């Protein structure tokens, strides 16, 4: 079994937990697995710090910690597809300028929108309706997910864990453009490592 060690530099626990469950689900039945490095000490903590330091954090992850890959989590805080494309392209340019690569987890608006899709799917498992949740106002998405627009990680983390566990990756990729872009990056990385999907 091949273990792919990774670093994570993102805004919050919700992103980190979502990523963990996504990677665990993706690796089920495979001859490889992902494992986060618990000793990676760099923490984004907020959007401005992640935007300012993600390229440096990835370089530290890949060179000093010798991770196989690094994930960057950044909530877009906007639902405009053009803003999404521009943000991701700018981030990739900055990484290329340092000659490093990273996997960008950039949800349209915020990670809670990807979680809201999973929540909706769990509540409506037989539905084929193509709901659009990424235009839902952020405070509303958080309220529907957590019961309040502002909540402690002690309250939100178990909800994220429950919602993201055993996620239907293909279903989510068919509903969210930003998740599909992230999922494709991860698939391309896995293939580039000579591993089977």
Image (spheres, rainbow, N blue to C red):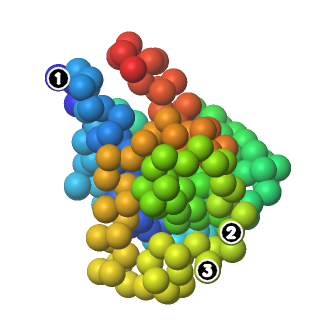
Residue beneath label 2, please? Answer: 136
Q: Residue at x 25, y 48 (%)?
A: 37
Residue beneath label 1, please? Answer: 1
Q: Residue 195, position in %: x, y?
A: 35, 16
- In primary-sequence order, the first of circles 1 and 3 is 1
Query: Around disc 3, counting alpha carbons within 10 Å, would you say few (fewer than 14), some (14 to 19), or many (20 or more)?
Result: few
Element at label 1: loop
Element at label 3: helix
Q: Residue 125, position in %: x, y?
A: 45, 50
The C terminus, quarter of image:
top left
Q: Nearer the viewer, mark 1 or mark 3?
A: 3
Numbered circle sitting on residue 40: none
Residue beneath label 3, please? Answer: 139
Q: Residue at x 29, y 80 (%)?
A: 154
Query: Farthest residue toward the right?
Result: 82
Question: Are the residues at dot 3 and dot 2 in contact (C-beta closer than 8 Å)?
Answer: no
Element at label 2: loop
Distance of mark 1 from mark 3, alpha carbons? 42 Å
Query: Around disc 1, counting alpha carbons within 10 Å, would you say few (fewer than 14), some (14 to 19), or many (20 or more)?
Result: few
Query: Farthest residue toward the left?
Result: 1
- Can I make out residue 163 in this image? yes
- In primary-sequence order, the first of circles 2 and 1 is 1
Q: Residue at x 44, y 18 (%)?
A: 191
Front-lying residue, 173 or 154: 173
């Amino acid at each position: 079994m091949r273990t792919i060690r990774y670093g994570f530099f993102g805004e919050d626990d919700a992103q980190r937990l979502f990523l963990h469950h996504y990677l665990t689900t993706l690796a089920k039945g495979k001859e490889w697995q992902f494992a986060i490095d618990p000793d990676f000490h760099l923490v984004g903590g907020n959007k401005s710090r992640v935007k300012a330091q993600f390229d440096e954090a990835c370089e530290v992850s890949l060179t000093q910690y010798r991770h196989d890959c690094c994930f960057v989590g950044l909530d877009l805080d906007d639902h405009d597809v053009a803003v999404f494309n521009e943000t991701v392209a700018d981030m990739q340019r900055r990484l290329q300028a340092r000659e490093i690569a990273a996997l960008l987890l950039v949800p349209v608006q915020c990670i809670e929108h990807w979680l809201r899709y999973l929540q909706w799917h769990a509540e409506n498992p037989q539905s084929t309706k193509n709901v659009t949740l990424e235009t839902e106002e952020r405070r509303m998405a958080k309220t529907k997910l957590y019961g309040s627009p502002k909540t402690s990680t002690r309250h939100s983390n178990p909800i994220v864990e429950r919602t993201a566990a055993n996620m239907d990756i293909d279903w989510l990729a068919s509903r969210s453009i930003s998740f599909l872009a992230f999922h494709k990056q991860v698939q391309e990385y896995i293939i580039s490592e000579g591993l089977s999907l």
